Amino acid sequence: MDKQSPALTHPLDKTTLFIDIGNTAVKWLFDGDYQSVAVTKFSPTLLPKTKRIFVSCVGDKTLLSGLKNTTFVESKATFNAFKSAYKNADELGVDRFLAMIAAIDQYPNQTRLIVDAGSALTFDLILADGKHQGGLIMPGLGKLRRSFDQFCTESQQLHNHKLADNTSDAWACGTGQMFTSVINAQIEHYLDEFGDLVVVLSGGDSKLLALRLSHAVKLQPNLVLEGLSIYAQTLTA
């Protein structure tokens, strides 16, 4: 189980448990502390005891079977300054929705590009006024590296512009360069279009990526939980 960086403090933090269930990891925030564990190693017994739980889930809801007072949140068309670009707001993944409202809260009055590098790689652009312009979804690093059975690797290493002398390393280096290149290309595109742009990097591979990108980013690996904490305040007001 990995302990994460210190949390932002919101009024509910000391009484409420916030859980982010992804496809490969379960993260939670309680009383200012972030924790994370692989889905395969998760058990509800790892969670602190509390009477109020809010959940963002894009994975398996049954992981929390038996827990009481649990609220699963859903994406909304609007939230404070946020306005979704999706015609059907509920089609927007709740993790992306929460990451965006957190970015709006933390970087007000700025154009923001949210890059979430997890099981999937997602991009979402939000203008300074909070209007979502839409997004992209691509395979995450792990999915990309497992896309061909004969080259499948679980390597999490990223090498910049390295040529390999064997097939295994050639696949790892090639997919790594593909992954970082597409992120750099998206950042460059929106920098050219908007000039002033805050790039917020989140997700399980964000710390690894931050060292390999060509542009400055705001590293926020727990952006979904921070958005969940913000959103939950409106449900308990």
Image (cartoon, rainbow, N blue to C red):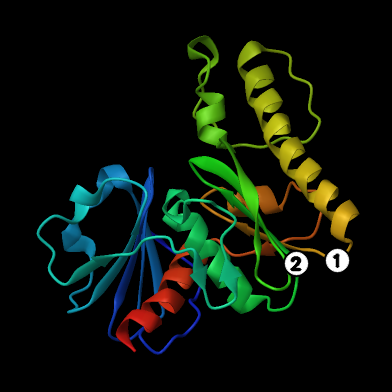
The numbered disc on residue 111 is 2
**Residue designated by label 1:** 196
Q: Is residue 20 in view from this perspective?
A: yes
Is residue 107 shown above or below 135?
below
Taking depth in this image into account, of 51 and 145 the one nearest to the observer is 51
Which comes before the other along the chain, label 1 or label 2?
Answer: 2
Q: Residue 8, percent across and down?
A: 50, 80
Q: Quarter of the image holding residue 56?
A: bottom left
Q: Residue 209, percent across and down?
A: 66, 48
Q: How many angstroms separate mark 1 from mark 2 (CA)? A: 7 Å
Please report the residue visible at 19 percent of the width from the left and 56 percent of the height from the top.
64
Q: Is residue 31 in view from this perspective?
A: no
Please report the residue visible at 71 percent of the width from the left and 30 percent of the height from the top.
178
Q: Residues within 10 Å of mark 1 (few under 14, many from 20)?
A: few
Q: What element carries label 1?
A: loop
Please report the residue visible at 67 percent of the width from the left and 32 percent of the height from the top.
176
Contact, CB < 8 Å: mark 1 with mark 2?
A: yes
Taking depth in this image into account, of 235 and 78 the one nearest to the observer is 78
Residue found at the very far left of the displayed protein: 66
- Count of marks overlaid on the render: 2
- Amino acid type of disc 2? Thr
Q: Is mark 2 on a helix, strand or loop?
A: loop
Residue found at the very far front of the displayed protein: 87
